[in-house]
Image: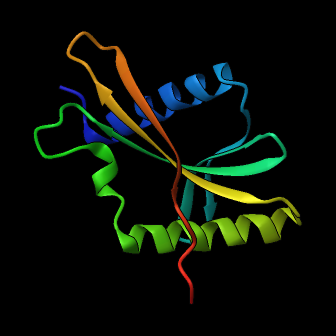
Amino acid sequence: MLSNTLIGVEGEKAAKSWLESAGYVIRDTRWHCGHLELDIVAEKDETLVVIEVKTRTSEQYGEPEEAVSEKKIRRIVNAADGYIKYHRLDLPVRFDIMAIIREPDGSYRVNHIEDAFMAPVR
């Protein structure tokens, strides 16, 4: 049985591969800003796309995207702000979720949710 950490890492690899095949340019993976992390940062159509990857081995406890709480959204937005400032970017930003289910045969079912959430108003 795979650990949750390994399942997450493998899910991020599957997401990255899927995004590249869909024409996204991957800028960074697992980018850290202090205690904050962005799973995948990509670009497509002159837009910076911040992607949160959620991987599960089943839907027994709900869909993977349901694990992205309001608290998690705030952390992602804060990390994205750090990323934009660090790299001095001037691009529109979109927040996506890649919900991934690892099938029993080892394959991955990918659900790419574009514009999954907006940055909360402060």
Residue 23 location in percent, x, y? Answer: 73, 25
Residue 100 location in percent, x, y? Answer: 37, 33
Q: Quadrant of the C terminus?
A: bottom right
Q: Which residue is at 43% across, 36% downward?
A: 9
Instruction: Tell me: residue 60, above or below residue 92.
Output: above
Residue 20: image quadrant is top right
Q: Is residue 6 visible?
A: no
* Count of all numbered marks drawn on residues in the image: 0
Q: Which residue is at 22% across, 31% downward?
A: 57
Residue 29 location in percent, x, y? Answer: 62, 43
Question: Which residue extends farthest left?
Answer: 60
Between residues 85 and 23, which one lies in front from this camera angle?
23
**Figure colour scheme:** rainbow
Q: Quadrant of the N terminus?
A: top left
Q: Which residue is at 58% across, 23% downward?
A: 17
Residue 45 is left or right of residue 30, and the answer is right
Residue 46 location in percent, x, y? Answer: 84, 46
Q: Which residue is at 65% across, 23% downward?
A: 22
Residue 61 is left or right of residue 117, and the answer is left
Between residues 76 and 7, which one lies in front from this camera angle?
76
Question: Which residue extends farthest bottom?
Answer: 122
Instruction: Tell me: residue 122, above or below residue 111.
Output: below
Q: Is residue 104 visible?
A: yes
Instruction: Tell me: residue 17, above or below residue 4.
Output: above
Question: Which residue extends farthest top?
Answer: 105
